[in-house]
Image (cartoon, coloured by chain):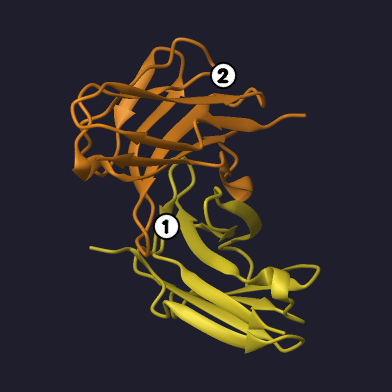
Amino acid sequence: DQQVKQNSPSLSVQEGRISILNCDYTNSMFDYFLWYKKYPAEGPTFLISISSIKDKNEDGRFTVFLNKSAKHLSLHIVPSQPGDSAVYFCAATTSGTYKYIFGTGTRLKVLA
Amino acid sequence: EADIYQTPRYLVIGTGKKITLECSQTMGHDKMYWYQQDPGMELHLIHYSYGVNSTEKGDLSSESTVSRIRTEHFPLTLESARPSHTSQYLCASSSGTPVYGYTFGSGTRLTVV
């Protein structure tokens, strides 16, 4: 039973346009959500997070939106750059469990 | 610079060999984790530790074992490697503050032939 789902395995976007990566979850106890970026043969690096008391968090070109009623979050990258080409994982946790559940990832390719 | 280190980055080894994957962090985090990831799949938690002399098995059953004798060190051992153990192994640490997530090492790509 997959609690965190990324239904799009891949996405291609033109340089300068917006990239939108989506993530759905099933566990209503999750109260923190994170996005990680992973290059081949490297470990994931933390990008941005959001707590369930917010519906938006922004950091530079990256914005995460949370829709609790739909159990859905999305990561927007504006403008997209070729260096953003990587696999993006969403993850979720419940405070106090100290463990994160990860999605299967979406491979983003930004075309120059 | 505070960081988390994994060695080796790549390892090709024969069936039946004993291997230890090293993981060390200099951030003073008390929580450490091992994840396994196959291409195109989610990260699966195989072991975790919330402090010295404390280790637990994760959600994915694994034949590996871990130890936590020092806060900064969390090695993973396979007593007898098999081709089914071929995967990427990722070590991570955390302060426990949920908004900051994990800090991951660079990973070890293990191939058992």
Drawn side of residue A22 relative to residue A9, left or right: right
Q: Is residue A104 left or right of residue A39?
A: left
Q: Is residue A97 above or below residue A105?
A: above
Residue at numbered disc 2: B72
Letter of the chain that mark 1 sits on in the rendering: A
Nearest the camera: A17 or B88? B88
| Kind of residue indicated by mark 2 | Glu
Give the residue displayed 56% in from the left and 19% down from the top: B72
The kind of secondary structure element at disc 1 is strand
Looking at the rendered structure, the secondary structure element under dot 2 is: loop
The quadrant in which residue A101 appears is bottom left
Q: Quadrant of the C terminus of chain B?
A: top left
Figure colour of chain B:
orange
Decide which of A20, A50 is in the foreground and name it. Answer: A20
Please state the horizontal and vertical placement of residue A65, each as a whole percent of the image: 61, 75
Colour in which chain A is drawn: yellow
Amino acid at dot 1: Phe
Q: Which mark is residue A102?
A: 1
Q: Residue at x 56, y 36 (%)?
A: B94
**Where does the image place residue A48, in percent across and percent down from the top left?**
66, 60
Q: Are marks 1 and 2 on the same chain?
A: no
